[in-house]
Image (spheres, helix red, strand yellow):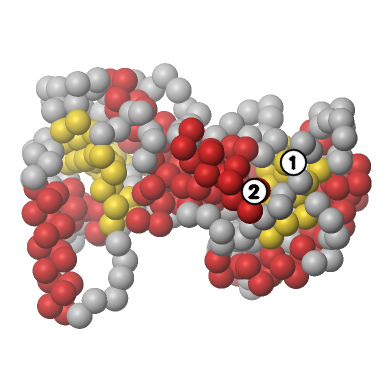
């Protein structure tokens, strides 16, 4: 059921639009079709996207927006925090936004939409926001959750509900030539062997219940090196360097630990240089797909229908169990997922055989 409270369409032609996405990195990537739709509908408008700083730089090269407003989460003294907030919202008001759109149901984005001064403020209705949060918006979309709906479609439905037409639903990230040159330098610094199939493998997630076993990754990497003549780059955050090294040291030559060696924007450039991405349901998967790299992804409790990249070049491997996807944080919210623990390397290779066979013609 879809219900709109307030004005059902955007009034006039906004001159300055604030789009607020205070989700994780993957959420920001999946928001790009919303940015594109706003640009196509309002080509003369100034479009500003507000996002957490950990993801904001992914949008630096996006041709459909004018400014990225990076929001920082840092520990400050009370006085320093007061000064920071005053400066932030002064800068926000200087944008002179007449339309603000919040893509989440939290309170910070709602406050930001209100303090922007925009006369039109659109958002999703929040069941727990009846006291004051919902009242901040001039128009709200009541949208019941539909299991299996892709997140891109869910985000776009807010715009469509108020008359924004959507031509393209595929997330697309842009990477500058300068960043690609820097990645080539990084690969050279790490003595990464050139001239072979370059595969990025991201074994880790923010959530343990989404991860596969270390020994299985070692076996998979060895297979990729031997059968596809590949060079494998194990990726991850700075905090995952030691875990990545545990995998790399068991894989021999042509496997490299690049975890923590790039910013998030440079990670996008690295994935664009790769011919294939393999990994868990994570931000890396969304980034790889958005820069045009084919993917093989492992899904456990979460739903591929909601989160996996769409298209023939993106393959999902998931255990065939009656409880999958349960959409819980592991079995009974235990942070351990039987569907991933029991997923074998042989099953992965069988499921992914057609995808991987595309790369067997790569010469030495």
Describe residue 60's horizontal placement relative to residue 274 as left or right.
Answer: left
Q: Residue 350, how many percent across, how many down?
A: 88, 42
Tag count: 2
Q: Residue 22, how many percent across, how many down?
A: 34, 53
Describe residue 140's horizontal placement relative to residue 312 as left or right.
Answer: left
Tell me where residue 19 sits by quadrant.
top left
Q: Residue at x 12, y 51 (%)?
A: 91
Quadrant into which the C terminus falls: top right
Judging depth in this view, the residue of 6 and 90 nearest the camera is 90
Q: Residue at x 80, y 67 (%)?
A: 249
- The CA span between labels 2 and 1 is 9 Å
User: Closer to the N terminus: mark 2 or mark 1?
Assistant: 2
Q: Residues within 10 Å of mark 1 (few under 14, many from 20)?
A: few
Residue 259, placed above or below residue 265: below
- Residue 187 badge: 2
Q: Residue at x 24, y 20 (%)?
A: 43
Residue 206, placed above or below residue 5: below
Judging depth in this view, the residue of 295 and 252 nearest the camera is 252
Judging depth in this view, the residue of 273 and 24 nearest the camera is 273
User: Where does label 1 land, which residue?
Assistant: 194
Is residue 115 at all visible to an observer of this figure?
no
Q: Residues within 10 Å of mark 2 (few under 14, many from 20)?
A: some
- Residue 293 badge: none
Q: Quick one: SS at disc 2?
A: helix
Q: Residue at x 16, y 33 (%)?
A: 16
- CB-based contact (under 8 Å), mark 2 and mark 1: yes
Tell me where residue 362 sits by quadrant.
top right
Q: Residue 194, how many percent across, how many down?
A: 74, 41
Q: Residue 153, how many percent across, how many down?
A: 46, 34
Quadrant into which the N terminus falls: top left
Q: Quick one: SS at disc 1?
A: loop
Describe residue 9's horizontal placement relative to residue 159 as left or right.
Answer: left
């Amino acid at each position: 059921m879809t219900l709109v409270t307030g004005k059902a369409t955007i009034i006039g032609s906004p001159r300055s639009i604030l789009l607020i996405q205070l989700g994780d990195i993957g959420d920001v990537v999946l928001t790009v079709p919303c940015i594109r739709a706003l640009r196509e509908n309002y080509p003369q408008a100034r479009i500003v996207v507000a996002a957490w700083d950990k993801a904001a730089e992914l949008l630096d090269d996006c041709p459909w927006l004018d400014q990225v407003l990076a929001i920082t989460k840092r520990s400050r003294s009370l006085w320093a925090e007061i000064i920071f907030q005053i400066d932030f919202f002064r800068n926000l008001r200087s944008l002179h936004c007449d339309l603000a759109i919040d893509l989440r149901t939290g309170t910070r984005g709602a406050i930001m939409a209100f303090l922007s001064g925009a006369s039109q403020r659109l958002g999703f209705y929040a069941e727990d926001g009846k006291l004051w949060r919902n009242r901040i918006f001039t128009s709200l979309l009541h949208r019941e959750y539909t299991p299996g709906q892709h997140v891109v479609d869910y985000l776009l439905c807010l715009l469509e509900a108020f008359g924004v037409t959507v031509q393209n639903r595929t997330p697309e990230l842009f990477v500058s030539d300068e960043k690609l040159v820097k990645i080539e330098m990084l690969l050279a610094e790490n003595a990464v062997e050139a001239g072979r199939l370059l595969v990025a493998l991201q074994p880790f997630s923010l959530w343990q219940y989404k991860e596969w076993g270390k020994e299985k990754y070692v076996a998979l990497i060895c297979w990729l090196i031997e059968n596809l003549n590949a060079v494998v780059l194990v990726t991850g955050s700075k905090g995952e360097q030691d875990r990545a090294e545990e995998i790399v040291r068991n894989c021999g030559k042509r496997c490299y630990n690049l975890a923590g060696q790039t910013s998030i924007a440079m990670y996008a450039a690295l994935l664009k240089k790769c011919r294939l991405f393999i990994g868990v349901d994570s931000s890396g998967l969304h980034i790889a797909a958005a820069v045009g790299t084919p993917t093989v992804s492992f899904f456990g409790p979460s739903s591929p229908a909601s989160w996996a990249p769409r298209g023939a070049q993106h393959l999902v491997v998931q255990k065939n169990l009656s409880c999958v996807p349960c959409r819980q944080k592991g079995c009974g919210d235990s942070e351990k997922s039987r569907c991933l623990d029991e997923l074998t390397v042989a099953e992965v290779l069988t499921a992914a055989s057609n995808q991987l066979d595309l790369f067997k013609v790569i010469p030495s």
